[in-house]
Image (cartoon, grey):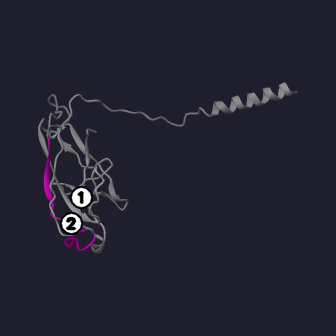
Amino acid sequence: MKTTYKLMVSGLLLALAGNSYAIDGRINFSGAIIKTACVINGGNDVDVPLGTYSAAQFREIGDTSPNIPFTLPLANCPVAQKEGDPLPHFRIWLEAEAVDSTHPNLVKLGNSFGDTMADGVGIQILDANTKAVMLLNTLPTITYDIKTATMDVNLLANYQSFKDPDDITAGPADASVNVTLDYR
């Protein structure tokens, strides 16, 4: 009796185990690895001096300092190899800590030394041609065509307030942003 019971339970478990392997769909991955990729500023950092401003200048939430133009100089970019090839392009993926969840595209001030920073403002980055805000930590919508192996991407940066004027504190206003060129 015990043997029959064990066989029945084993058979039932075996039958149920087969159902756990049912396939409901498939994920197909595609992509490419390229040999040549754009090099930003010869592999060096790009420094952007944003200037010094009075906290009183930010009278309302959303007020900005003047736009400061800067350039990402690119070299060694992959270009179309022959006539008729599609024009290569890239997107600029920016990674940095945002000031908070309600301002996901405003870079939080801070440095690698942990110094106390000004508070109530963050850094906003924009495309110089379209004036569109560059997205942080997500796939960007702006694409840049690669027409030549050497090119410049023109951007703008400013400080933007995200707190009431009375809550803005003075201090250094530094930050860093990691840049990745995404060739999708």
The quadrant of the image that shows the C terminus is top left
Please tell me in which quadrant of the rendered image residue 173 appears: bottom left
Q: Which residue is mark 1?
A: 124
Q: Position of residue 96 (x, y in %)?
A: 30, 50
Query: What's under tag 2, amino acid-wise?
Result: Thr
Q: Position of residue 92 (x, y in %)?
A: 24, 45
Identity of the residue drawn at 79% across and 26% down? 7
The quadrant of the image that shows the N terminus is top right
Given residues 156 and 20, the one toward you in this image is 156
Circle 2/circle 1 CB separation < 8 Å: yes
71, above or below 158, in the image: above
Q: Which residues are magenta?
A: 55-73
Identity of the residue drawn at 29% across and 74% down? 166
Q: Which residue is mark 2?
A: 64
Given residues 31 and 110, the one toward you in this image is 110
Given residues 124 and 19, the one toward you in this image is 124
Please tell me in which quadrant of the rendered image residue 128 appears: bottom left
In the image, 16: left or right of 131? right
